Amino acid sequence: MTGTTGAVVLGGGLAGLLAATVLARHVDEVTVVDRDGLPAGPEPRKGVPQGRHAHLLWSGGARTIEALLPGTTERWLAAGARRVAVHQDMVSLTAYGWQHRFPGTQFMIACSRPLLDHVVREAVLGHPRITLRERTEARALRGGADRVTGVTVLPLGAGREEDLAADLVVDATGRGSRLDRWLPALGLPVPETDRVDPGIVYATRIYRAPHGMAADFPVVSVYADHRDGGPGRNGVVLPIEDDRWMVTLSGTRNGEPGGGEAEFLAFARALRHPVVAELIAGAEPLTGVRRTRSTASRRLFCERAERWPAGLVVLGDALAALNPVYGHGMSAAALGADALDRALTEHALAPELAARAQQAIARVVDDPWIFAAAQDICYPDCRTDVRDPRLTTRAAERRRFAELIGATAIRSPSLSAATTAVSTLSVPSSSLEDPAVLADLRRGPQRPELLRPPLKAVERELLARCAAAGEGVAGPGPG
């Protein structure tokens, strides 16, 4: 790289691709290294083990990706994704009851994870400064405790390691990151790490949407009430491309969904309301049931390290792996890439860049980390290893405030808009302490409690048709 500046990105998933996009603005050459052979189309791949389950890209993440890669939203929609207004186009049973379908102030992009990734991958890898090294494994970081100078890689099947020099190495290898081995090899300790493991398991099946329900039928979700003392059982019906529904069920330890068809339907029936079971009763299954474990939340506090090497940045799931049920992982990765961009703009490739970037990325992943961890610790048999006082000594106080806001927002248009902006990672959680928000909270609910799913008349008719098609699949629900 004599006479040029260069960066190596480890990982060709969404976090790595967005990091590569950012780096191409600031260095001459960017090399993306991935162990997999990346698919040519919107297909699942081994390196994204949760890729077959429902993924929610909230507006905070979608807007950030659009800013980094202009035109991405239009390309998603042209490929079959749907822009879902939150909460206007959603029917949601929260822990506190049914959410009113207030006019949408935020949105989500609804489609399969392979489609999301494919559209981004095509745009990123078409950049003249970005080169892909697929089927290549990262084996070690080069350099020492003061500075990382590159990475040792092994082209799979070739049998001979090689060194790639770099002014900056970005670890975006996800949950499988080997930082816990690489850093000690450089003479550095592994950063302080917090873990929250509710033992959640995901089960997903794809269905053909019934006639009349493909175009505008709302996203339907039924979430657990974390206050009832039992395992957390959830279900979501997500419209995806090609007139299909992705139905994902999840359950925490001792409440996991099974992998068979009968078990899948039984789990859907056992949710707090049978609407998910009623919907899939009238839908044609297109796949079997796929299950995934290993979805614990884990965060490395790299920004707290006494010594952090110049030339190394960690982002995405390698830094903060989140329970996917909350849908924040992709948006957190996008915000992390944006934070890296801002750090590069301010510091270029100066020695302090890596530490400054790590601090900036830590700030934007803090909200989604706390959202996931604080909720998960409420479930029985959740295994935790945490030191963050927000999850220990201050957990009860924070939970009381969250429950008051949650119970009020589902029945208050203005408070719902404020909390939705936070939950979609469009604004920081500190905005909930603004005087106007607190005034809304003191006013209390402004709409009546909903006793049944807030479906429109035509949606109720379609649901009844689905339930009739699978008579006996779902029993009567509350309300």
Image: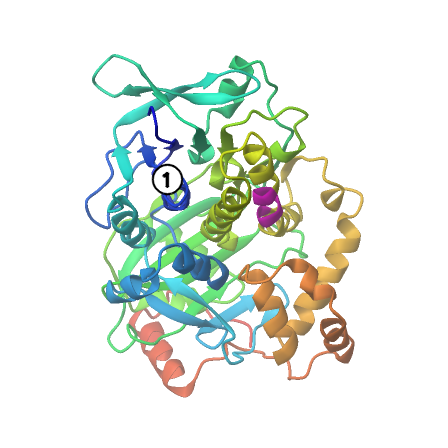
| Residue 171 in picture, x, y percent from top left | 45, 32
Under mark 1, the amino acid is: Pro
Q: Which residue is mark 1?
A: 49
Residue 362 inside the magenta-drawn segment: yes
Q: Tell me which residue sits at (62%, 67%) in the image.
A: 419
- In the rendered view, would you say 476 is above or below 160? below
| Residue 390 in picture, x, y percent from top left | 74, 46
| Residue 148 in picture, x, y percent from top left | 49, 22
Residue found farthest to the front:
3
Residue 412 appears in the picture as rendered: no
For label 1, count other residues whose C-alpha is less than 10 Å away and answer few (under 14), some (14-19) or many (20+): some
Magenta span main SS: helix
Q: Tell me which residue sits at (34%, 27%) in the image.
A: 3
- Give the total of numbered labels: 1
Colour scheme shown: rainbow
- In the rendered view, would you say 309 is above or below 463? above
Q: Tell me which residue sits at (57%, 19%) in the image.
A: 146
- Quarter of the picture containing the C terminus is bottom right
Give the quadrant of residue 457: bottom left
- Quarter of the picture containing the N terminus is top left
Residue 99 inside the magenta-drawn segment: no
Relative depth, front residue between 155 and 284: 155
Q: Is residue 275 left or right of residue 253?
A: left
Residue found farthest to the bottom:
457
Q: Tell me which residue sits at (37%, 31%) in the image.
A: 6
Residue 378 appears in the picture as rendered: yes
Q: Which residues are magenta?
A: 360-365
Give the quadrant of residue 456: bottom left
| Residue 187 in picture, x, y percent from top left | 58, 13
